[in-house]
Image (cartoon, rainbow, N blue to C red):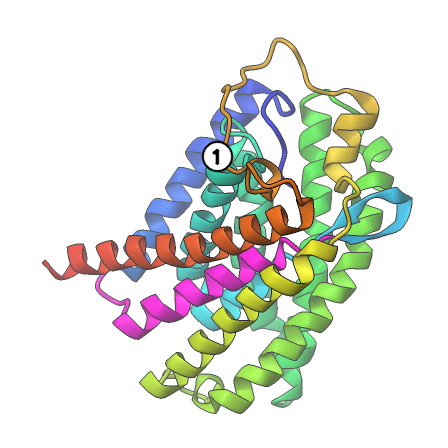
Amino acid sequence: MHAPDGFYSNSLCLIMDMACTGVLAYSVVKIWKRISSREVILASAVGAFSFALQLANFKVSRGSSCHFMGGIFASIILGPYLATLVMTFEHLIQVFLFQDGGIMALGPNLLTIVCISTFGGYYIYSLLKNFVIEPYGSYISAFLSAWLTLLVTSLTVCTMLSICGIQGFFATLGPMVGPHVEVGIAEGMLTVLLLVGVRLWAPDLFSSQPRLQPTSAQKIAYGLFGLALLISLAISPFASRSAEGLESLVLDRGHIHPHRITIPYRAPIPAYHLPGIRDQEIAKILGGTLGTVATFGVCMLALSLIKARAES
């Protein structure tokens, strides 16, 4: 879903940029004077974990690859507004540190990578879980919302590609929707597994009046950050190197438009490989680990500044 510059039309990018800026501003307003210190730490760990998850690409049908998103899990744990901010910080690191996605295309990418899962997925989850008794309601609704949001996300990309005149809507359904239907099943299963672990560690989060206790927040934060480091160190080097579904369209059909605005930029760690290291596996391990730590640090700094500003 990390579209490069020159892929979507200039007008669509500008409209999405403005829309997503409004969503982010509204999210800041919603957490203003409400975010606690323990939520800052927990949100930072969730951001680092989501970043690490997206390092682990795996091969799917049609010769492309997909990765986990983590947006549903983040929104269930943090709520849609805080999750939106955290996932946005994560995406900005992917763009500016690793050149994963275009600068001009930030708006469309934030819509598909962040907003659909953190808002749409969260409200699907909240609606569905009321129809089944707990704890099964949370697990079933988490699985379905994770699967549905990836389906909606891929359909949204197809729609935007059609609007931009890159390819007809139905022509992109196969390359985009097919792989994400598959990865949606894996995303749903992973989300359920994570929620089971969180419920064991922090049952207060799933009570009728959820209130995250300091010890529970610390347990979840430490656990997620540890898992994030484990993924970046031990799993990401074995990730599939096949292009993602959207990248496949770019590579196979050459849809970068020469008359669309592109912002030239060279990231310090392109393609998640730390420069200057000959061994590509080690370069990727170090690059991914650095990105995981950077995501935690940026989320911690940004949210701490918001909290301090709100309290001043």
Question: Crowding at label 1, few (<14), some or many (≥20) Cα neighbours within 10 Å?
Answer: some
Whole-percent x and y of residue 47?
A: 47, 60
Could you say which is closer to the camera, residue 94 or residue 168? 94
Q: Main secondary structure of the magenta part?
A: helix
* Relative vertical location of residue 77 with respect to residue 176 in this rendering, above or below: below
Whole-percent x and y of residue 255?
A: 74, 20
Is 99 colored magenta in this rendering? Answer: no
Whole-percent x and y of residue 257?
A: 67, 14
Residue located 82% across and 50% down the image: 179
Residue located 74% across and 50% down the image: 66
Is 55 colored magenta in this rendering? Answer: yes
Residue located 64% across and 83% down the image: 137
Which residue bears the numbered disc 1? 268
Could you say which is closer to the camera, residue 35 or residue 67? 67
Residue located 53% across and 39% down the image: 98
The magenta-colored residue range is 32-57
* Relative vertical location of residue 52 with respect to residue 263 in this rendering, above or below: below
